[in-house]
Amino acid sequence: MVANNSGGYSSSTIINTNTRTYHGLLIAKIKEGRFLYLSKIDEEIEIGEKTYHLGTNQYQNNTIYPQGYQYLKEFYLEDGIPTFIYSAGQFILEKKIWMEYLNNTTYIRYLLHPPNLPLNLKLVPLITFRSHHDVFRGSPDLHFETSIIKGGLKIKPHIDIPPLIITSMPDANFYPTGIWYWNFTYFQEQERGLNFKEDLYSPGIFYLTLEPGNPLTITASLEETKINSSEAHEDEIRRKKEIIGKNHFYFENFPEKNLINQLFLSGNQFIIKDLEKQKVSIIAGYPWFYEWGRDTFISLPGLTLATGHFNEAKNIFIYFLKFLKQGLIPNIILENEKIIIHNSADASLWLFWALDYYLKFTKDYLFLESIYTELIKIIEWYVKGTYFNIKLDPKDGLLYCGEQGIQLTWMDAKIEDWVVTPRTGKPVEVNALWYNALNFMENWSTILNKKNKNFSYLELIDLIKKNFILSFWHEKGQYLYDVIDTEAENDFSLRPNQIFAISLPYSLLPLELEKKIIHIIEEKLLTPFGLRTLSPDDPKYIGKYEGGVNNRDLAYHQGTVWAWLIGAFCEAHYKIYKDKEKIIEILKPILNHLKEEGAIGSISEIFDGDYPHCLRGCISQAWSVAEILRIFHLISSN
């Protein structure tokens, strides 16, 4: 999985068999959304009378043709660039795939290694024009308009979106065909209960003689490229080395610095920019997520501050605050800001936490002063009450939130009008965040000498501290309730949300209770890849995230493991025990995941709660990567 930092990406399996609607060599971010243009290229090598088909496709009835995977001998990331080595005795062919920074352009580079003799290479591009969420069924009567241009061809879609330009360097002979390939089968979508059959169109065949040591690069783009392929390759390597150059983490007895380097590269792909709009944001995950307020500010410290991208961090705050509405920043900004949804009780509170990180790194109090009015608005709206029944309870200083049919916390699965984990009442992590936000504001108002005239932060802080343990401590279970003041009894489900009462800068608990919570979470919720969302002892626990949409939504927060939660657990553990080696041991399995499965070089969104904890969900998730980066920074700087 590689991305262009403007919302576009390129993704497939390592044998180049597409198994998802989201797989393709060029998924472009355009004003209409993210659209798949170039699905794949199938390669054929001709040596004398022998033809080697390097492509691999799955069709209906589980037909696999051709079976080029047998020639794939090696796959690895070189300077962060996916690299494939094909060999069949008579040749060694290297293929690399990358995207141009901030442009909807994918490069596919072929290099025949010496001392092989020259060989004939045929390339069959397979295209479609559709949203990356959908599939497309072709028709014998549909032929995309193709025109020959210098070095390649331009293909006009059947819908009103920009054309696709495919070129080769050096120039290859192009022979037009205009034929359909029918019934590609995407088995991962089939397993997920979604549309899984597609037809792809080939405009023709590129054909040339490949000389040893002289690379051929195919460029798929929405614009005529302004640089040659050699410069593009060098530019991408240079850019990635600059990102890695910011890695100053150091650990004794930990030789895996290359994995930390790859985390830096992966993390950078989530920072997206729109130069025309002067916008910087964070994409929540590849392939299907876009901008989420909560995910953005949980991810910001790891993706931007631990990696030295301070200016990007500041611009992300500016971008989200412009959408502030009655104290709430957006929960979701759909592509191109067409729809903005504010249904989150905690996204604005995570912004305070991220801002505290930013100020610790930069001491940029001029910026703090420039947004201070917005910060006061957030606090005041929470105090007097805002959308979705989010409001302060003046009796105990705690926040109440909840409205029928609306999901407001990060546990946000919903099946039609039914919220799977509604958590209406006073959620534990929302109130830990609220307590911390008030402490931040008390500190910042002192620094800026700007006291709030409407109420005292200290009085609210004292009120919450007085009531938090009395309200949230579940004596029988020896841990914190997940939600109190619900319509029924307090929710005593053993969930990971209580960890934030310890991990956040301003803890609400005495040391002996913190240790009890750490112990029970480690015993019941900790896995090699994150924390379970529910104890396996709970009758509502679902250990596998599989099946159709409804089945998966039922399991999403009912036992499924979330990688990002391991960050808060590690931070809480480190605050109490200061055991750096223990934290490294906890994180080693997720680092091995980085190099062995999923989107190679990145970290998945979720895993099954049951052993062997199969990866599920989004293949590359911002807060999963960000929280590992943040924790490595934490333990390397202490």
Image (cartoon, rainbow, N blue to C red):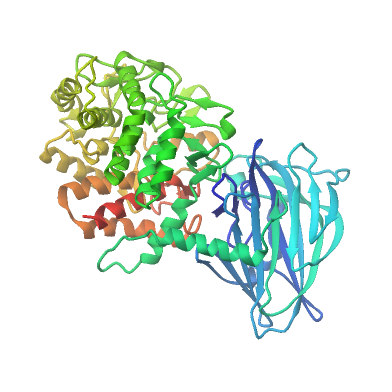
Is residue 446 visible in the rendered structure shown here? yes
Q: Is residue 257 left or right of residue 226?
A: left
| On screen, residue 336 above or below 637 | above
Q: Residue at x 31, y 60 (%)?
A: 249
Q: Quadrant of residue 350?
A: top left
Q: Position of residue 28 (x, y in %)?
A: 64, 46
Q: Quadrant of residue 232?
A: bottom right
- The quadrant of the picture occupied by the C terminus is bottom left
Q: Residue at x 26, y 35 (%)?
A: 498
Q: Is residue 307 left or right of residue 71?
A: left
Which one is in front, 453 or 129? 453
| Number of numbered discs overlaid on the protein picture | 0
Most distant residue in the bottom direction: 115
Q: Position of residue 571 (x, y in %)?
A: 25, 47
Q: Position of residue 88 (x, y in %)?
A: 66, 78
Q: Position of residue 495 (x, y in %)?
A: 30, 36
Which one is in front, 449 or 179? 449
Q: Is residue 401 left or right of residue 457?
A: right
- The quadrant of the picture occupied by the N terminus is bottom right
Most distant residue in the right direction: 141
Q: Residue at x 54, y 36 (%)?
A: 549
| On screen, residue 374 above or below 278 | above
Is residue 539 visible in the rendered structure shown here? no
